Image (cartoon, helix red, strand yellow):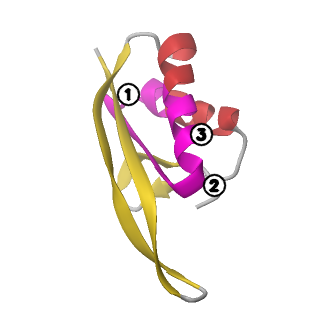
Amino acid sequence: MDMAEKEKGNDNVIFVGKKGIMSYVLAVVTQFNNGEKDVVIKARGRAISRAVDVAEIVRQRFVTDTVAKDIKIGTEEIQGEEGPVKVSAIEITLSKK
């Protein structure tokens, strides 16, 4: 999850990981420039704050006619070294007005 990857079947989903914030901002802006009406930014664990930063930078500096249409938070269970581990997750949907 450390790349601005697109979910299979969903071109408008950006997974935020360990890269620099501007890599993800560029990925989101590119999606909007390609005609997408909604772009979903997803992150887990420590990357959550980076996902929020990406959404805010896009909204305030690059595509100023977007709004945070939906924000979902939850817990996902992933397989860790010592068995299942629960991590927080966020899904931010940005939408053009």
Does the image show residue 23?
yes
How many angstroms separate mark 1 from mark 3 (CA)? 24 Å
Mark closer to the observer (2, 3): 3
Q: Identify the residue at image location x=57%, y=89%.
A: 82
Q: Is residue 25 left or right of residue 95?
A: right
Residue 22 magenta: no
Q: Earlier in the sequence, mark 2 or mark 3?
A: 2
- Locate the C terminus and report the quarter of the image it occupies: top left
Mark closer to the observer (1, 3): 3
Label 2: which secondary element: loop
Q: Identify the residue at image location x=58%, y=49%.
A: 47
Task: Residue under label 3, please give it.
Answer: 50
Q: Is residue 95 left or right of residue 4?
A: left
Q: Is residue 68 left or right of residue 43?
A: left
- Locate the N terminus and report the quarter of the image it occupies: bottom right
Q: Identify the residue at image location x=53%, y=56%.
A: 45
> For the residue carrying disc 1, how many other residues have a C-alpha within 10 Å: few (<14), some (14-19), or many (20+)?
few
Task: Residue under label 2, please give it.
Answer: 3
Kind of residue indicated by mark 3: Arg
Task: Residue under label 1, please give it.
Answer: 35
Q: Identify the residue at image location x=57%, y=12%.
A: 61
Q: Is residue 55 left or right of residue 65?
A: right
How many angstroms separate mark 2 from mark 3 (CA)? 13 Å
